Amino acid sequence: MNGQAWLLLFEGAWTTLWISATAIAIGVVLGLAIALVRMAKVPFVDQLLVLYISLARATPLVTFVLFLFLSAPTFGINMNRNTAAIVAMTLNTAAFNAEIWRAAFLSFSREQKEAALACGMTSGVFFRRIMLPQMITTSLPGLVNEMSFLIKGSPAIAVIGIVDLTRVTNRIAAVTYDPLPPILAAALLYMLIISALLKLQAMAEKKANRLAM
Amino acid sequence: MSEHTHASDVPAVSIKKMSKSFGDIEVLRDIDLVVNKGEVVSVLGSSGSGKSTMLRCINWLEEPDRGTIHIAGQRIGVNEHAGRKMTGKELATVRAKTGMVFQGFNLWPHLSVIQNVMEAPIYVKGMPKEQARAIAIELLEKVGLADKHNAFPFTLSGGQKQRVAIARALAMSPEVILFDEPTSALDPERVGEVLTVMKNLSAEGYTMIVVTHEMEFARAVSDQVVFLEKGLIIEKAPPAQFFTNPKTERVRKFLEISA
């Protein structure tokens, strides 16, 4: 592989990285918001969210990306490829994240909440200072798992013409007639990205040991 | 906060006609209790008599069905001016005047010992961090744990955890500290260290309501002993009278078995 090929490969890696990172960042927060709303058990809204989560979890990412990109104009929404990819990946990952956050909500100890209320904390302060920090620590392994699934599923966005890290290997091979080196290089880059995530997970697990009472 | 000079002031806690049911079961019936500033009240009774529920109603962790509770003169749970239930924020303001120590310690495991103590002063009272830190160090010295201030709760013994929990309750300078069986979850050899701290607090003039099975503590430290049976206060007396000359057959039996 020559310098030109490497340059293309890094461009593809960058595309994969920034689109995935954007979807992950929004998806983690959106998942938390969905879990919060679900904990409030508002009638109708709750059923709607359950339906969304079921649909998003049951649909392959590639199908979802394609559907969103092709159907958006029908609803009068003009989306470019990148936006469609980000929206689809965000909606996909938020559904899984919502379930991870919800599990953390459900397993949180009532005793700690009582201790917080007893010394005069409002529910808001309790959530921000006591509950959320612990939920982040306990949920991080699950969230990171979902992040790595999302990144590994991200080649799906090539279906609407985005040249991501996997798609770019095709392009390089089309010129060099040697498909193996770019594929291997891409695999290496995926591993690098994922291993950074796993590092984060290991840090969280170390911190989580403190929470064992 | 040393002498009992304010006994004539507004009581620290005043409970009138308080009742509470869980479903069909009436757990508390017409509870009347006045706790003056600087007093220690021990609450005795067998399991299921309503002791803990009574304590948990005082800071509204359980909502009583009827009756009124005042903390240092302020009604808890009901906004009397507006004639409605208190909002979460209003409730929090009154709760901040009480401290609670739980049977299971209920420390926050993600925070170090000193952070557990500083948390409420900073985030409830809005106290500057440095000031909260100074107070926390002082309180940890009081409970004998200043050397553990950077430790995390999972590294502590039960007795140490409970002493941190006491320091956490003290940090808000509460009008009254509610103790819910503070030594019941401890190894026998750890009970003493917690009771010693509590005895010292009483000597310093803290107002305390203590649900306990520790007869010796109740006898030595309390100003009043209250005995609950099936949700009713059937006896309320100074310890000298309660332990030597109980009025009811039920208490006489209870003391015989506990002796």
Image (tube, coloured by chain):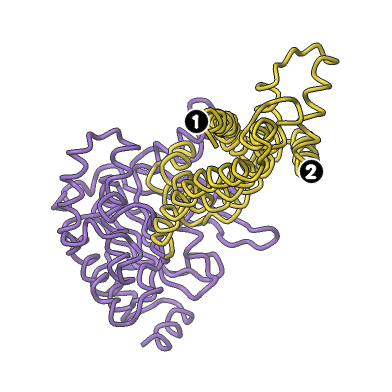
Q: Residue furthest right?
A: A74
Closer to the chain start, of discs 1 and 2, is 1
Q: Is residue A80 above or below residue B169?
A: above
Chain B visual colour: purple
Quadrant position of the C terminus of chain A in the picture:
bottom left
**Position of residue B36 measured from the top left corner of the image (x, y, whole percent):** 29, 52
Dividing the picture into quadrants, the one containing residue A49 is: top right
Chain identifier of the residue bearing label 1 in the image: A
Within-10-Å neighbours for mark 2: few <14, some 14–19, many 20+:
few
Q: Are marks 1 and 2 on the same chain?
A: yes
Kindly identify the amino acid type of the residue bearing the numbered disc 2. Answer: Ser
- The residue drawn where x is 24% and y is 46% is B8
Q: Which residue is mark 1?
A: A3
- Give me the C-alpha separation between circle 1 and circle 2: 45 Å
Q: Which residue is mark 2?
A: A54
- The residue drawn where x is 29% and y is 49% is B115
Is residue A43 in view?
A: no
Asked if residue A138 lies left or right of residue A52, the reply is left
